[in-house]
Image (cartoon, rainbow, N blue to C red):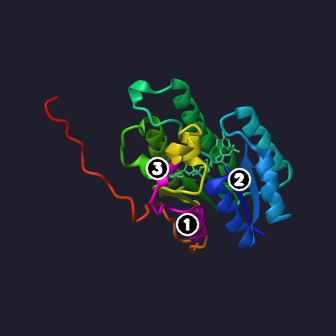
Amino acid sequence: MKTAFVTGASAGFGKAICRQLIAEGYRVIGGARRMDKLMQLGQELGEHFIPLALDVSDKASLDKAIGQINQASLSIDVLVNNAGLALGIERAQQCDPQNWERMIATNITGLALITQRILPRMVEANSGLIINIGSIAGTYPYPGGNVYGASKAFVKQFSLNLRADLAGTRVRVSNIEPGLCSGTDFSVVRLNGNMEAVEALYKDVEAIRPEDIANTVSWIARQPEHLNINSIEIMPVAQSSAALNVVRNL
Ligand SMILES: NC(=O)c1ccc[n+]([C@@H]2O[C@H](COP(=O)([O-])OP(=O)(O)OC[C@H]3O[C@@H](n4cnc5c(N)ncnc54)[C@H](OP(=O)(O)O)[C@@H]3O)[C@@H](O)[C@H]2O)c1
């Protein structure tokens, strides 16, 4: 039985990815801070789902979680680096620096350290797949994207650089870059629980669904072992790039 480790399994994409991989016969370790949500998911998914308390932004928690995986002699075939968050939509000049620190600690440092802990065993086994969840925000700038977008640009470049380091091994790395997605807690977190603003964001828009991202993860994992899917950028049809901004009479 193959083992997948999905970070950020308590909600949104992560939860849908766990459901999909369990349905496909994987053993799935699902990590997140909210153990109650993970236990609930465990009740739904059964014995092949292993809930794991994990705060990727806290090195002690991360080390403990990795220690638990190693102690259980579970080697990871598929790592899905999904845990992440955006905080705020303010322009850079108005941002709360604590929000920036949390995004960097979670989306950059946490993702990098989890990868660093899992990678040596994959290389030793000469097999493994890392799927990072980036974002279109890592490619396309938008007002209020500042550190969030930059953290996803890190994920994009880190994924490519991992491939460079892994040359000569069979370990694969992919980056999924989704656009606007509904049905997750992402915007609730980003807009600090302002449900009116969340509803306004998704009003009359058919966005990506968490299941679409879970399908993409599953598709990547099913590709033949001689193929590396470098990146997949996905937007809902309702979303497209805007023209470059020009301010007159500046
Ligand atoms: N939704 C979108 O429109 C969208 C678009 C592009 C990319 N993304 C990316 O997709 C990923 C998943 O987002 P989502 O939409 O599914 O959001 P979500 O519903 O808010 O889920 C985020 C998950 O990450 C976990 N998480 C957050 N901080 C964590 C930490 N310090 N340690 C461990 N787990 C942590 C949360 O669990 P706990 O709170 O229980 O820890 C939760 O399970 C993120 O990386 C996000 O940046 C989302």
User: Which sits earlier in the primary sequence, circle 2 or circle 3?
Assistant: 2
For label 3, the residue is: 201
Q: Secondary structure at mark 3?
A: helix
Q: Residue at x 39, y 62 (%)?
A: 238
Evaluate whether residue 85 shows in this view. no
Tell me the magenta residue range. 199-220
Q: Which residue is mark 2?
A: 121
CA neighbours of label 1 inside 10 A, class few (<14), some (14 to 19), many (20+):
some
Disc 1 secondary structure class: helix
Mark 1 vs mark 3, CA separation in Å: 19 Å
Residue at 65%, 62% in the rendered image: 17
Residue 171 position (above or below residue 150): below
Q: Position of residue 14 (x, y in %)?
A: 65, 56
- The nearer-to-camera label among 1 and 2 is 1
- What label sits on residue 212 in the rendered view? 1
Above or below: residue 66 compared with residue 94: below
Label 3 beta carbon less than 8 Å to ligand 1: no
The answer to which quarter of the image holds residue 189 is top right
In this image, 152 relative to 211: left or right? left
Q: Nearer the viewer, residue 36 or 32?
A: 36
Three-letter amino acid code at the position of disc 3: Leu
Three-letter amino acid code of the residue under disc 1: Asp
Q: Main secondary structure of the magenta part?
A: helix
- Please report whichever mark, 1 or 2, sits nearer to the chain's N-terminal start: 2
The location of residue 6, given as percent across then percent down, is 68, 55
The span from disc 1 to disc 2 (Cα, nearest Å) is: 30 Å
Label 3: how many Cα within 10 Å (few below 14, some 14–19, many 20+): few
Is residue 181 highlighted in magenta? Answer: no
Q: What residue do we see at 47% from left, 63% from top?
A: 206
Query: Is 205 covered by the magenta stretch?
Result: yes
**On-image quarter of the N terminus:** bottom right
